[in-house]
């Protein structure tokens, strides 16, 4: 209920991990521990998922196990070489897991269409896929549907009553398990600001018509922490060998797999590299779909390598090993460069300079006001030692925070953001002196942590507004010279906690708090609660009508 951003709709990329963590925590450990364990297990399952995906696609091939091993190897190396590794580092754990799972799901569907097997582990896996794929990421539908539709069209004669039954069963399982949170997300669809987010920070969107060539051959990378462009070598190998393998599949007796791969890869290719030209698709951040694009190329590449290893691809005897060798060399160089620098290593320790900021906030800032914190991200090179310090500061310091990073989630509570010279959705220099004073008063700001030159210049340009208490490198630690109160109207005492506002000694027939109102807010004992808009904040504040002297506010 404070001004700090909080997601108002479902974070559609970690639902599976949230549900699993909450469920498993009823047995042992805490939800946050299970969340990390489940995320690790999802990543550790990559070789197994790709092995069985390759095995399913080539179930009737005499070298199916060899192809499966190669699929597992390439899929695992791809994780270390490319975007899934960076997504895991950045906390975007749902999408790459959904991409790998989608490859497995399509392979299961191929078996159902091709063989019509008796009920068994294959069908159990199919229903499990239906249950988990949407919670992993809702965009998975875009990944696997083109492949499945192609598999239905190519061998039309295989659409039987049994296949229809298992399709309906999968839909029923998926709907039953995911209906509650999907309904909530749909009800909050008006909170979707995806297009605005892409306009503000186009991490996975490019309207350059040469995006494909730049992504594979150019020195420039799209949203990458890699020290060089060598990462592209392994992906280029997958593209060449995957395309050759897919072509050979169409020519030989695995035509359904080849046609399905061609259709699905074509859709993913167009979406990845040209989707940003369509405004509605640009909001999906389409460049992220190069992950499933590369993973389905792994299937074709595994087949191509098997053909070469078994001497069934004599015409390309030199092309295959040369491409594989160069791609493998690029892979080794990339992994050594990346991992030796430690840039993608998660850590729990903080440098002394960062600890000093935390200590100052916890010891020197007033407890009856908020700390306005200027965050730094990709746009300014992560000033706070490569981390979003605002994520840790409230817990470590015990202070209420306002500000925080750029809005990269689909919610509306990011008006009160402060990052890299941007305050309340505007350049801080464009905010008038009176408006800035009013903002600090409205949000009850008692201290400011800022680093950007424009922010420092603006705050220090207003006479008597702030006092610089300490400097740590470019970071200024400042106190705001103003009386502090949690009340716009009325008076009393406030004690804030997790989903809890305890109000005591309230004075006044109407109380207007400097806390945001949210749907589901309730009072104990009962009191009349109204939302009230103040200034230009799109989120209303809490107003109490004729409240008792003491009460507790919670969201239920």
Image: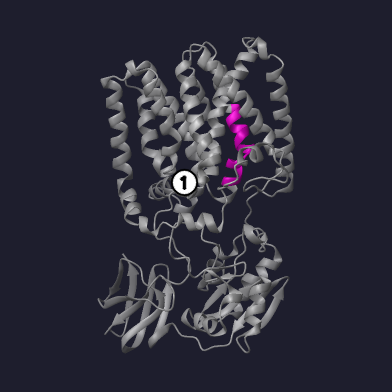
Give me the residue at 39% from left, 48% from top: 19
265 shown above or below 209: above
**What quarter of the picture does the C terminus occupy?**
bottom left
Give me the residue at 30% from left, 66% from top: 520
**What quarter of the picture does the N terminus occupy?**
bottom left
Q: Is residue 51 visible?
A: yes
Is residue 366 on the magenta stretch? Answer: no
Is residue 76 on the magenta stretch? Answer: yes
Q: Residue 218: horizontal and vertical position, in percent?
A: 70, 40
Give me the residue at 48% from left, 53% from top: 32
Q: Residue 396: horizontal and vertical position, in percent?
A: 56, 67
Most common secondary structure along the magenta stretch: helix
Q: Residue 407: horizontal and vertical position, in percent?
A: 51, 61
Secondary structure under the numbered disc 1 in the rendered image: helix
Instruction: Report the label total.
Output: 1
What colour scheme has been applied to the protein in the rendered image?
A: one colour
Closer-to-camera residue (501/378): 378
Q: Residue 213: horizontal and vertical position, in percent?
A: 65, 37
Q: Is residue 45 visible?
A: no
Q: Residues within 10 Å of mark 1 (few under 14, many from 20)?
A: some
128 shown above or below 491: above
The quarter of the picture where residue 155 lies is top left
The segment highlighted magenta reads 73-87
Residue for badge 1: 281
Closer-to-camera residue (64/209): 209
The quarter of the picture where residue 320 lies is top right
Give me the residue at 66% from left, 73% from top: 454
């Amino acid at each position: 209920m404070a001004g700090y951003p909080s997601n108002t709709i479902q974070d559609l990329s970690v639902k599976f991990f949230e549900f699993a963590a909450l469920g498993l925590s009823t047995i042992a450990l805490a939800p946050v521990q299970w969340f990390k364990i489940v995320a690790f297990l999802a990543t550790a399952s990559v070789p197994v998922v790709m092995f069985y995906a390759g095995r399913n696609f080539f179930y009737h091939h005499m070298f199916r196990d060899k192809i499966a091993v190669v699929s597992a190897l390439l899929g695992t190396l791809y994780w270390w070489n490319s975007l899934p590794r960076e997504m895991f580092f950045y906390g975007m754990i749902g999408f790459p897991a959904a991409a790998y799972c989608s490859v497995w799901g399509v392979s299961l569907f191929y078996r159902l269409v091709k063989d019509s097997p008796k009920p068994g582990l294959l069908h159990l896996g199919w229903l499990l896929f239906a249950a988990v794929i949407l919670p992993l990421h809702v965009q998975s539908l875009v990944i696997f549907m083109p492949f499945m539709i192609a598999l239905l069209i190519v061998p039309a004669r295989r659409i039987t009553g049994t296949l229809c039954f298992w399709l309906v069963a999968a839909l029923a399982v998926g709907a039953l398990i995911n209906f509650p949170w999907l309904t909530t997300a749909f009800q909050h669809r008006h909170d979707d600001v995806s297009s605005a987010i892409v306009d503000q920070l186009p991490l996975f969107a490019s309207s350059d018509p040469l995006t494909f060539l730049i992504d594979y051959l150019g020195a420039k990378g799209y949203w990458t922490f890699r020290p060089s462009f060598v990462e592209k070598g392994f992906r280029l190998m997958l593209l060449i060998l995957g395309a050759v393998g897919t072509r050979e599949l169409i020519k030989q007796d695995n035509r359904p797999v080849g046609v399905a791969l061609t259709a699905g890869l074509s859709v993913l290719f167009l979406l990845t590299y040209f989707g940003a030209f369509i405004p509605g698709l640009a909001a999906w951040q389409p460049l992220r779909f190069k992950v499933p694009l590369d993973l389905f190329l792994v299937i074709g590449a595994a087949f191509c390598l098997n053909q070469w290893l078994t001497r069934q691809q004599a015409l390309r005897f030199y092309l295959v090993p040369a491409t594989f060798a160069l791609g493998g060399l690029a892979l080794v160089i990339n992994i050594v460069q990346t991992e030796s620098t430690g840039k993608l290593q998660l850590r729990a320790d903080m440098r002394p300079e960062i600890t000093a900021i935390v200590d100052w906030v916890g010891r020197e800032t007033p407890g009856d006001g908020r700390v306005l914190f200027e965050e730094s991200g990709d746009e300014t090179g992560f000033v706070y030692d490569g981390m979003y310090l605002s994520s840790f500061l409230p817990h470590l310091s015990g202070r209420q925070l306002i500000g925080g990073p750029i809005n990269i989630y689909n919610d509306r509570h990011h008006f009160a953001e402060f990052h890299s010279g941007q305050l309340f959705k505007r350049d801080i220099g464009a905010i008038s002196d009176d408006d800035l004073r009013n903002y600090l008063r409205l949000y009850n700001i008692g201290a400011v942590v800022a680093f950007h030159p424009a922010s420092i210049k603006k705050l220090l340009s207003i006479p008597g507004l702030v006092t610089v208490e300490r400097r740590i490198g470019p970071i200024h630690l400042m106190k705001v010279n103003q009386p502090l109160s949690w009340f716009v109207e009325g008076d009393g005492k406030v004690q804030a906690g997790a989903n809890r506002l305890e109000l005591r000694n309230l004075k006044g027939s109407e109380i207007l708090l400097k806390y945001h109102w949210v749907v589901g807010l309730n009072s104990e004992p009962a009191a009349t609660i109204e939302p009230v808009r103040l200034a230009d904040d799109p989120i209303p504040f809490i107003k109490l009508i004729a409240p008792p002297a003491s009460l507790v506010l919670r969201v239920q």
